[in-house]
Image (spheres, grey):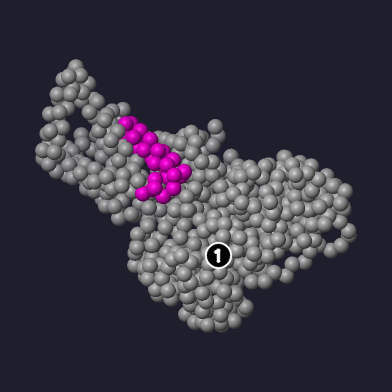
């Protein structure tokens, strides 16, 4: 019930968002009409339509988004026609003459002009509300992101639609309040100024401006990137009331919308790595406790969930929790293009090797972030390249993810010999504490490891620990679903080929495209050779998740830093001249600065067409 309230309040806050601006003229166009007969039906149609379309889009993939595009075009035509009739009343009379005649006959057969007029007004308002609902593209703040996360991960359900309806009802409520106040002001202006016709034409002009803004994509482009009232912080505070805020640690990733089809792929909400409340304090205490006292600090967090639902197992036949009784189990949720997962992986591998003979079983649950990570061939190659020797459950449908109620990459769950979860850790770091937990659980199972030092890891390349003190650039997604700080003129154009230009100057953490790109929900695909991506960043390492959209055909790349070849600052996937090749869908390390870390301008040029770019990460 509390989640429904939060969704409703998130919708109420929508009126403070710039994304509501294009639909305001449609709502206020009927501000001089009785609210119950005109305003309320319009808002009802708008709320129901948005909830229905959003439900379909959340669980139905790209086809639902495409269907809504046709609906938006029809709604734009309808609203434009409505605006023209407000500007030119004589045209409205001519256009409406057949409808008026039909309405008169209908009302007469129904038993009265008054009733027929009321029904006609009600139906007209509902139809306008439906059109407005098709046009409305609200900014996806934290609350709407939370609702859509549950929709995508949980699949189609009544709760999904009801939550989206609660969000839409909240928006309709705030618009209703504004409409009531606006309607009274409208009537007062007409009465005091006698300027009803000019007001009518002004609203018609505003309506056509709204149509133009939506037709040009400003509602999902420029306006979506503005922050007039800073509602995100308020929404996040509401979410924290439902789910207490967790203590931040190192950077990790968490999903916002996981689509069920490769077409629509995955919209991800990047987040800081998090630990459950109290675990940070427990980490400090455990380092000073003896094994006996540490045992008291590991409560039972619940029974280990089922491992059923994996689409395939690598390095092992399918495993079950029942068959693993008597073993200590470490579950590692990861995905192979996640930089945080890659940096944690050497420790997980070292634990698996060191404690295998004592009864530790490590299971990697590979839950994909991007669509290409659902390809089992890609996962198998990554497992081989990364030298992962322990069992890996390919969790493409997020069955194990949901069973654990997991939210983060990487996430580690420590299960004792009785099948109970005794500890968990989200994100990178706390490796010594995690190993002490493993040793403690093995001791409880009667397999106490011999005294000795904890594992020491000397990782190389992208798996090396991040230079956290110098990371001032955030994970940045290139697909329009989560793109931020995009600097090319005109903004991102969704799902259509478009010629972009890289500006001469970029501010810190701004990025831009150059060349002929088609930007999808989670990635951008280059249509012609010589395309570029530029980013002004501040970090020791720069990584970019890349692939080839043309059947894996290699794509040559050239990297520069501040307009020059990277030299000794090149990453492991390019040489000193900045030259390299995209040879698969994975994370590429393109920059590793050896000297002082400062703001630098990174550019990558793609010498062949077909490059697909997903996300920047830094270390």
Taking the image as shown, residue 447 lies to the left or right of residue 226, namely right
Q: Quadrant of the C terminus?
A: bottom right
Q: Position of residue 51 (x, y in %)?
A: 41, 38
Q: Residue 384 lies in magenta, yes or no?
A: no
Taking the image as shown, residue 98 lies to the left or right of residue 241, namely left
Q: Secondary structure at mark 1?
A: strand
Q: Position of residue 81 (x, y in %)?
A: 20, 44
Q: Quadrant of the N terminus?
A: top right
Furthest toward the top, the residue is: 111
Residue 497 visible in this rendered orientation of the protein: yes
**Who is closer to the viewer here, 392 or 183?**
392
Which picture quadrant has residue 377? Answer: bottom right
Q: Main secondary structure of the magenta part?
A: helix
Q: Residue 45 lies in magenta, yes or no?
A: yes
Taking the image as shown, residue 198 lies to the left or right of residue 181, namely left
Which residue is pictured at 81% across the width and 52% down the height? 359
Q: Position of residue 535 (x, y in %)?
A: 48, 69
Which residue is pictured at 78% across the width and 53% down the height? 360
Query: What are the residue bounds of the magenta stretch?
Result: 39-66
Residue named by callout 1: 586
Which residue is pictured at 44% across the width and 44% down the height? 60
**Rendered view: 103 above or below 617:** above
């Amino acid at each position: 019930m509390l989640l429904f309230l939060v969704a409703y309040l998130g919708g109420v806050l929508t009126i403070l968002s710039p994304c509501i601006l294009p639909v305001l003229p449609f709502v206020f166009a009927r501000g001089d009409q009785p609210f119950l007969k005109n305003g309320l039906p319009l808002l009802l149609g708008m709320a129901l339509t948005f909830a229905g379309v959003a439900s379909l889009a959340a669980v139905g993939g790209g086809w639902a988004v495409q269907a809504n595009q046709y609906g938006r075009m029809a709604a734009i035509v309808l609203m434009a026609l409505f605006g023209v009739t407000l500007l030119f009343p004589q045209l409205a009379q001519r256009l409406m003459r057949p409808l008026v005649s039909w309405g008169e006959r209908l009302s007469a057969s129904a038993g009265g002009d008054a009733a027929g007029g009321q029904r006609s007004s009600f139906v007209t308002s509902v139809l306008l509300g439906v059109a407005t609902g098709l046009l409305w593209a609200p900014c996806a703040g934290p609350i709407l992101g939370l609702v859509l996360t549950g929709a995508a991960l949980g699949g189609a359900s009544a709760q999904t639609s009801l939550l989206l309806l609660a969000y839409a009802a909240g928006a309709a409520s705030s618009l209703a309040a504004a409409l009531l106040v606006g309607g009274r002001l409208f009537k007062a202006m007409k009465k005091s100024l006698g300027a009803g016709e000019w007001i009518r034409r002004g609203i018609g002009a505003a309506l056509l401006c709204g149509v133009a803004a939506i037709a040009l994509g400003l509602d999902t482009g420029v306006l979506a990137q503005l922050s007039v009232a800073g509602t995100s912080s308020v929404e996040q505070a509401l979410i924290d009331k439902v789910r207490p805020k967790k203590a931040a640690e190192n950077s990790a990733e968490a999903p916002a919308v996981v689509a069920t089809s490769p077409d629509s792929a995955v919209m991800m909400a990047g987040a800081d790595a998090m630990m459950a409340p109290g675990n940070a304090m427990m980490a400090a205490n455990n380092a000073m406790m003896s094994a006996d006292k540490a045992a008291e600090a590991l409560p039972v967090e619940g029974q280990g969930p089922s491992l059923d639902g994996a689409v395939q197992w690598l390095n092992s036949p399918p495993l079950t929790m029942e068959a693993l009784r008597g073993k200590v189990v470490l579950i590692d949720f990861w995905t192979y293009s996640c930089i945080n997962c890659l940096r944690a992986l050497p420790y997980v591998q070292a634990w698996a090797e060191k404690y295998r003979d004592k009864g530790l079983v490590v299971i990697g649950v590979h839950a994909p972030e991007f669509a290409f990570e659902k390809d089992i061939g890609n996962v198998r190659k990554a497992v081989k390249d990364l030298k992962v020797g322990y069992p890996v459950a390919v969790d493409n449908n997020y069955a194990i993810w949901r069973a654990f109620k997991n939210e983060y990459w990487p996430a580690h769950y420590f299960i004792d010999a009785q099948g109970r979860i005794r500890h968990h850790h989200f994100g990178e770091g706390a490796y010594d504490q995690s190993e002490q937990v493993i040793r403690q659980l093995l001791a409880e199972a009667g397999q106490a490891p011999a005294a000795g030092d904890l594992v020491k890891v000397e990782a190389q390349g992208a798996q090396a620990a991040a230079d956290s003190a110098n990371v001032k650039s955030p994970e940045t997604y290139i697909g329009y679903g989560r793109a931020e700080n995009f600097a090319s003129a005109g903004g991102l154009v969704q799902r259509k080929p478009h010629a972009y230009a890289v500006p001469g100057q970029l501010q810190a953490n701004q990025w831009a495209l150059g060349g002929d790109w088609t930007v999808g929900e989670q990635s951008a695909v280059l249509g012609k050779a010589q395309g570029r991506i530029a980013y002004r960043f501040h970090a020791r390492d720069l990584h970019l998740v890349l692939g080839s959209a043309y059947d894996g055909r290699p794509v040559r790349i050239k990297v520069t830093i501040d307009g020059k070849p990277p030299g000794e600052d090149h990453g492991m996937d390019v040489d000193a001249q900045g030259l390299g090749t995209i040879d698969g869908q994975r994370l590429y390390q393109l920059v590793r600065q050896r000297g002082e870390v400062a703001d630098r301008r990174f550019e990558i040029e793609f010498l062949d067409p077909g490059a697909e770019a997903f996300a920047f990460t830094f270390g």
